[in-house]
Image: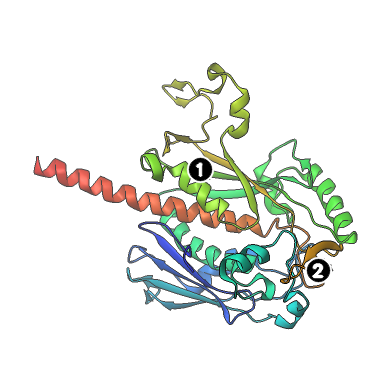
Amino acid sequence: MAGNSFGEIFRITTFGESHGQGIGVVVDGCPPSIMLKKLDFDLEMARRRPGTGEFDTPRKEEDDVEILSGVFEDRTTGAPIALFIKNRDARAKSYDYMKNLFRPGHGDYTYHMKYGHYDYRGAGRYSARETAARVAAGVIAGKILSQAGIKVIAYTVELGGIGIETKDLSVIADNPLYCPDMKKYKEIEKALSEAKANGDSLGGVIEVLVKGCPAGLGEPVFDKLSADLAKAIMSIGAVKGIEIGAGFEAARLKGSQNNDPLTLSGFSSNNAGGILAGISNGDDIILRAAVKPIPSIAIEQDTVDKNRNPEKIKSSGRFDVTAIPRVIPVMEAMVKITLADHFLRSMIMENYNKLQDAES
């Protein structure tokens, strides 16, 4: 099974299944001498951990990160860093009912068509459980970025069709959905309660803000920073769309409206979302991602079995009402991993240029 790695210099490879022994990640390319302790993972893992919110799956996982290699005396050594997160509350028997059924909205059908034999328990490899490994890797990437003064923060701007009207980032820690509009948060909370009572689920939109990113990150043509960020975010199973800066709104603007004029103090607007020609321009990087509703719902739906016989299916396992807010630290992690990779690439180019200057 290919497609389990991401990044060039700072490269991650995740492994494990939802109801297997556990989930893990190997992080390669991390520079040496970065302080890293087991305790460093606790906060971010807690933000993604299931069973902590009213609208979360009741599955209880400690998401305790074990450092297996690449760290000595609380410092990275430059060797591959292996992290492991044990599954402690897996209930494989809960999925026996769907052994031969294809769940609408899930990858059951496509995995069956591609692999034939696959782990169907709780979606196995394509389960959202895999993202715990990404969050752990994002902690390491964040340490690299913090040394460069780069900060990544994500928050909810729409959920259940209810969009924010104000954006006060100082209040996102005051509500479990990381919503920057407390008035709209109350409306969203009510909508989630109604969806839960009806056995349904809701989708939404997450915005990610990157502050302090220097100009010059990104590569020409195929490795544009925008392209790699899009791939990173779109690799998250619940995400169905992404836009950067003005995004789709740019298609409705004239060039005179969409261009960001340059002044002596910087850009006077940011429709580009901090990226021009695939390279960061030093402004804030802003992107938004569309998150689909959780496909596992307690409402009966039509499907077929593996013999193509028509069937009815109703999810009876442990599921979230929405992927938000647990997907927020996952998006932050993927953006951090992408930026760390491009930051290290830029350091190599900078050192190469210095060497060229010295030789000349």
Q: Which mark is residue 160?
A: none
Please rate how many residues cluster around mark 2, counting C-alpha atoms within 10 Å: few if below 14, some from 14 to 19, many from 20. some
Which residue: 52% across, 66% down? Answer: 136
In the displayed structure, does residue 239 sit left or right of residue 135? right
In the rendered structure, which disc, 2 or 1, sits on the residue that comes first in sequence? 1
For residue 182, above or below residue 131: above
Which residue: 60% across, 80% down? Answer: 20
Q: Picture coordinates of residue 190 (x, y %)?
A: 87, 51
Q: Picture coordinates of residue 27 (x, y %)?
A: 42, 67
Which residue: 74% across, 51% down? Answer: 203
Amino acid beneath label 2:
Ser
Classify mark 1: helix, strand or loop: strand
Q: Is label 2 or label 1 in front? A: 2
Which residue: 27% across, 51% down? Answer: 348
In the displayed structure, does residue 107 sit left or right of residue 318? left
Q: Which mark is residue 211?
A: 1
Please rate how many residues cluster around mark 1, counting C-alpha atoms within 10 Å: few if below 14, some from 14 to 19, many from 20. some
Amino acid beneath label 1:
Lys
- Which residue is at the front of the view, 220 or 164? 220
Q: In this view of the protein, can residue 139 be seen by the observer?
A: yes
Q: In this view of the protein, can residue 46 be seen by the observer?
A: no
What residue did someone put label 2 on? Answer: 315
